[in-house]
Image (cartoon, rainbow, N blue to C red):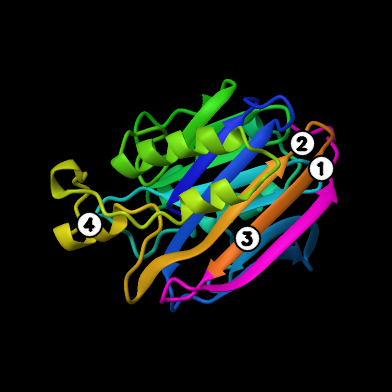
């Protein structure tokens, strides 16, 4: 997952709205969003190589999503799967504070990541880069790509502006999907330097990433309204950036007490 836009307690009818793109190699096997047979309360896509996921929700209003932290040349081949961070939170009953406190002890075992977790009452961000401290999010709009939260990369800045406008049109969904489909490449003078070749910096500068072997595999819109009605819409794409599937699930969620 390489772009996540979040509105947390920023809309009168929708306490949580998330629009996100997952970028990945097309050769990596993936299952589309569905309720998991081994964890029926969880709705998420699934990485069939490592078993985790990049974004998901549960019937208990739990939400989690992860992006990698891009740092060319610093990837460990023996690192644990970052997708497990999302799956483990969604299948647990630990509060966000308890989960992140426990995660701090093992965060170094993963390549760089950004993680957002919530339980309907609080929303938190944590990265094993930067200062390494959990951040409890106040009501507002947030954006996350492959650096720290709200790092003003050009694609994130433009996407957040479009996201703010799309919120005004809820419950309409198309403006969110339109912003996630933006393939504009950023001029070289505005590209970040993340340790990858310039050609890749260009490709990855778009909101919707297109290349022969790697690109945006799925666009997701998740909304939870004030009554706990959760809707997840996911559109999948092939290597030619053509829509190859769509999933839309709606269910009634409820808050449950959590364990510390």
Identify the residue at image location x=36%, y=70%.
Answer: 214
Q: How far apart are marks 1 and 4 (CA)?
A: 39 Å
Instruction: Look at the image and tell me whether residue 60 can be seen.
Output: yes
In front here: 215 or 89? 215
Closer to the chain start, of discs 1 and 3, is 1
Element type where label 1 sits in the image:
strand
Closer to the chain start, of discs 3 and 2, is 2
Neighbours of disc 3 within 10 Å: few (<14), some (14-19), many (20+): many
In front here: 17 or 80? 17
Residue occupied by mark 1: 229
Residue occupied by mark 4: 202
Instruction: Look at the image and tell me whether residue 127 can be seen.
Output: no
Neighbours of disc 1 within 10 Å: few (<14), some (14-19), many (20+): some
Residue occupied by mark 2: 225
Neighbours of disc 4 within 10 Å: few (<14), some (14-19), many (20+): some
| Mark 1 vs 2: CB contact within 8 A | yes
Identify the residue at image location x=55%, y=47%.
Answer: 176
Element type where label 4 sits in the image:
helix
- The location of residue 147, given as percent across then percent down, is 34, 41
Residue occupied by mark 3: 234
Q: Distance between the residues labelled 2 and 4?
A: 37 Å
Closer to the chain start, of discs 2 and 4, is 4
- The location of residue 37, given as percent across then percent down, is 79, 68
- The location of residue 68, given as percent across then percent down, is 41, 51
Neighbours of disc 2 within 10 Å: few (<14), some (14-19), many (20+): some
**Where the C terminus falls, by quadrant?**
top right
Q: Give the range drawn in magenta.
A: 237-260
Q: How far apart are marks 1 and 3 (CA)?
A: 17 Å
In front here: 198 or 76? 198
Q: How far apart are marks 4 and 3 (CA)?
A: 26 Å
């Amino acid at each position: 997952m390489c772009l996540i836009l979040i509105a947390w307690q920023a809309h009168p009818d929708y306490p949580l709205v998330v629009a996100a793109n997952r970028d990945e190699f097309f050769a990596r096997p993936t299952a589309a969003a569905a309720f998991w047979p081994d964890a029926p309360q969880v709705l998420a896509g699934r990485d069939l190589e490592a078993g985790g996921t990049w974004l998901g929700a549960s019937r208990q209003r739990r939400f989690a999503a992860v992006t990698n932290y891009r740092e060319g040349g610093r990837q460990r081949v023996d690192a644990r799967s970052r997708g497990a961070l999302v799956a483990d939170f969604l299948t647990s009953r630990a509060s966000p504070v308890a989960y992140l406190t426990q995660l701090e002890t093992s965060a170094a075992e993963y390549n760089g990541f950004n993680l957002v977790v919530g339980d309907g009452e609080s929303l938190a961000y944590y990265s094993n880069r930067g200062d390494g401290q959990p951040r409890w999010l106040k009501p507002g709009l947030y954006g996350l790509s492959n650096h720290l939260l709200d790092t003003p990369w050009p694609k994130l800045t433009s996407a957040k502006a479009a996201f703010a406008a799309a919120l005004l049109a809820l419950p309409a969904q198309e403006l969110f999907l339109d912003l996630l489909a933006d393939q504009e490449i950023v001029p070289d003078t505005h590209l970040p330097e993340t340790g990858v070749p310039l050609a890749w910096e260009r490709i990855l500068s778009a909101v919707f990433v297109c290349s022969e072997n790697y690109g945006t595999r799925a666009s997701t819109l998740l909304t939870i309204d004030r009554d706990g009605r959760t809707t997840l819409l996911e559109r999948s794409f092939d290597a030619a950036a053509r829509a190859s599937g769509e999933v839309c699930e709606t269910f009634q969620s409820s808050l449950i007490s959590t364990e510390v």
